Amino acid sequence: MTDLFIQPIFLLGFGGVGRALARQIVAARDRHAQRNKLRLAIVGVADSASAVVEPAGLTDQELLDLIARKSRGERLGAGTLSVLPDALPAHTIVVDTTATDATVPILLAAKARGMGVVLANKLPLAGELAWWDALADEQSRWETTCGAALPVISTLNTLLDSGDDVIRIEGALSGTLSFLASQLEAGRLFGAAVREAKTRGYTEPDPRQDLGGLDAARKALILARMLGYRLNMSDVSVESLYPVEMDALSVDDFLRAADSLDEAMRQRAAELTAGGRRLRYAAEIENGQLRVGLIGADPDSKLGSIRGSDSIVVFHTRCFDDNPLAVSGRGAGQEVTASGVLGDIVSLARARR
Ligand SMILES: NC(=O)c1ccc[n+]([C@@H]2O[C@H](COP(=O)([O-])OP(=O)(O)OC[C@H]3O[C@@H](n4cnc5c(N)ncnc54)[C@H](OP(=O)(O)O)[C@@H]3O)[C@@H](O)[C@H]2O)c1
């Protein structure tokens, strides 16, 4: 087909989400051509230690070979990436699926050159306000930074564009902590529930990264910043589900020692669930205040209704007052996140074309 718009894509990060995204781009070729008159050309891929840059676009076979090579633990190419390559086409979209803020200089350079940016990585948007100001504009998309592919960011943008007033946002923003809360509510002991969450692959390799609440706090901070609140992570009240002294332990020692928190967590869960309330690890944003931690949710509320490891964001607005607008469902997973990133890429490519 000759009438396809060729959209160059540069991928930062080639882990679980980055590789799933590359596979999905190849698998969606026909759909993008027919539905969007679009062909996504991967003009480079970088991980933490190596990079490949091909301004003319990698072939699908070259891309699939890179996925196979990376899955075997091999390097992608000879060089490492420290700056945005000069050779990239001017209308490239840079996609960040890393989990580091080391990519920020590259993202800022991309913006300075008028490129589009798509982020699955929360850290650049939850870091310095100057990064937020430079990155969070109409030439960027960041749907998967909050609730994976659930349309949380696009819903909030629509509410803000529609002239509605967002009064309060509440949400269960961590699939891991939703699972854990549901287990504690059912009378399961904390240590055993943490180990099960890890065995099921719900947690980060070090479960303290989930249990500390920072990941949920970053998601909530991104929503709060979209509302116009000039807040930083230091402004967020974050309840950690383990004491700071346990940071000194190895992962295995922490998993064993988690049993020592059983009784305190049992008591806290019992207090919060008195009268049939549901235990949730929730974010609350209202009047410029931001808190994440355990709460007892009304069982008839939307927040109280989610099950298992699902995520939910509830928007209480002037128009959606007595029956608030909720977005809920599966809010984590590499494949579903990659699909959300791909949706962002197509949305941005269409807007910029
Ligand atoms: N998984 C989910 O459910 C989910 C949901 C929503 C959002 N996210 C977000 O998506 C992102 C990716 O998650 P993931 O599960 O794919 O993580 P991952 O498997 O750990 O992959 C991260 C990738 O980033 C690369 N990287 C690290 N530093 C880099 C640098 N300076 N320059 C270029 N690449 C660099 C890593 O390189 P090496 O391979 O060399 O280590 C790795 O390839 C994270 O920010 C995560 O929070 C994930």
Image (cartoon, rainbow, N blue to C red):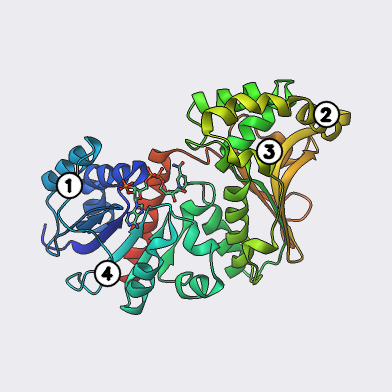
Disc nearer the start of the sequence (1/4): 1
The reply to whether discs 1 and 3 touch (Cβ–Cβ < 8 Å) is no
Which residue sits at x=55%, y=36%?
207
- Left or right, 309 with reference to 245: left
Residue 16, quarter of picture: top left
- Residue 242 numbered mark, or none: 3
Mark 2 Cα shell of 10 Å, populated few (<14), some (14-19), many (≥20): few
Of 292 and 254, nearer the camera is 254
Mark 3 Cα shell of 10 Å, populated few (<14), some (14-19), many (≥20): some
Of tags 1 and 4, the one toward the viewer is: 4
- Residue 267 numbered mark, or none: 2
Residue tagged by mark 1? 63
User: Looking at the picture, which amino acid does disc 4 mark?
Assistant: Leu
Residue 300, quarter of picture: top right
Residue tagged by mark 4? 84
The CB of the residue at mark 3 lies under 8 Å from ligand 1: no
Of tags 1 and 3, the one toward the viewer is: 3
Residues under labels 3 and 2: Cα distance?
A: 14 Å
Residues under labels 2 and 1: Cα distance?
A: 52 Å
**Image coordinates for residue 347, horizontal then vertical, percent:** 38, 60
Which residue sits at x=58%, y=54%?
219
Of 159 and 294, nearer the camera is 294
Q: For the residue labelled by badge 3, is the local secondary structure a helix, a strand or a loop?
A: loop
Q: For the residue labelled by badge 2, is the local secondary structure a helix, a strand or a loop?
A: helix
Disc nearer the start of the sequence (4/3): 4
Residues under labels 1 and 4: Cα distance?
A: 20 Å
